[in-house]
Amino acid sequence: MKIALLSDAWQPQINGVVRTWTQVIAELEAMGHEFVVLHPGDFRTFRAPRYPEIQLAIKPGKRIARRLDAFNPDVIHVATEGPIGMAGRRYCRRRRLPFTTCYHTQFPHYMRAYYGLPTRLTYRFIRWFHGPAEAVLVPSATVGRELNDAGLDNVKVWCRGVDTNIFKTYERTLYEDLARPIFVNAGRVAREKNIEAFLKLDLPGSKVIVGDGPLRADLEQRYPGVYWAGYRHGEDLARHYADADVFVFPSKTDTFGVVMLEANACGLPVAAYRVTGPIDVVREGETGCLNDDLKQACLDAARLDPDRCIAYAQENSWRKCAEFILDEFVPITAHRSARRVRV
């Protein structure tokens, strides 16, 4: 099967969208499917206001149409709601082609946080964007209910996975000079991740931030006692997880949080707020602790059994994730045949 993926988020960005699709594509290609990915690196771009790490394509529509015509895909999937996603949606609508979409991030909440846009307006956009899709894939049942409440009735819950060949336990050698217990966070150092809520906590031991982003310089200056490791990848990232004791996930806006599964696979229990994302990933009292008091969640999580975290993570594979989305794709030829039969 020839699959076209349109995404405004792609390498070298480091986020859940990129990580998810990189893994899924690898699994589907291993199963014999062919991919083309249309992403910002294919176009002239400009930096997103207030978020320079994100590059947005400039007028990608005509080139996207030419690329899709040349590739002649069996399936079209639109992963994001940016300029590339919009162009892909327009291509499908004009040609009356079926397509599926994803809802990876709490788009209305991010637009309010960064640009002050009322959520009622952005939810209207979300209904317009995702409504015509054969299915909009969401990372958790909680997010699915939120979109149902917002007026979408084509929602399907899509699982996430973790590569346990990389994310596993390792010998502890990285943080020998830091006092334990070690509380770690990994990901983009950006406003929506609410990292300062973690940095403000009065906790025993040490705090580690693995990642980078627009807020790092400011936070690093104001919290000099924190160990800042910068971006890490692959086994290096896994070792930074595995050498810690608790993974702290302070975000209140993530739809899932693949990093929590990665941390579990390395033997780390998760401490988080009781909000969308953690409530669908964490098994309370087993793989982590959820509490409106993040400090208490951290202290409680430090007492959990690492082996139970590892066992839980091993239940979630990227192959399972890839097989699910394969079942949800709607082949263009099958859709056309069904339309002819109905006529």
Image (cartoon, rainbow, N blue to C red):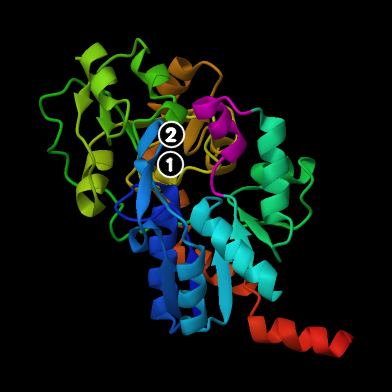
In the displayed structure image, the side of residue 234 where residue 306 appears, left or right: right
Residue type at mark 1 is: Met
Q: In terms of depth relative to the viewer, which is nearer, 75 or 285?
A: 75
- Seen at 57% across and 40% down, the residue is 107
User: Which badge, 1 or 2, is on the more N-terminal residue?
Assistant: 1
In the displayed structure image, the side of residue 197 where residue 61 appears, left or right: right
Please state the horizontal and vertical placement of residue 334, each as a whole percent of the image: 70, 85
Please state the horizontal and vertical placement of residue 20, each as a whole percent of the image: 44, 57
Q: Main secondary structure of the magenta part?
A: helix
Mark 1 touches mark 2? (CB < 8 Å): yes
> Is label 2 in a helix, a strand or a loop?
strand
Please identify, in this view, whether the residue under mark 1 or under mark 2 is nearer the observer.
1
- Neighbour class for label 1 at 10 Å: few (<14), some, many (≥20)? many
- Neighbour class for label 2 at 10 Å: few (<14), some, many (≥20)? many
- Seen at 33% across and 59% down, the residue is 41
Numbered badge on residue 343:
none
Is residue 97 at least partly visible in the picture? no
Is residue 125 at least partly visible in the picture? yes
In the displayed structure image, the side of residue 7 where residue 112 appears, left or right: right
| Distance from the alpha carbon under mark 1 to that under mark 2 | 7 Å
Numbered badge on residue 270:
2
Q: In terms of depth relative to the viewer, which is nearer, 68 or 213?
A: 68
Determine whether 331 is above or below 142 in the image. Answer: below
Query: Does the magenta-highlighted stretch encompass residue 106?
Result: yes
> Is label 1 in a helix, a strand or a loop?
helix
In the displayed structure image, the side of residue 68 where residue 336 appears, left or right: right
Residue under pointer 1: 260
The residue lying furthest to the top in this view is 202
Q: Which residues are magenta?
A: 104-117
Please state the horizontal and vertical placement of residue 116, each as a whole percent of the image: 57, 24
Query: Does the magenta-highlighted stretch encompass residue 196?
Result: no
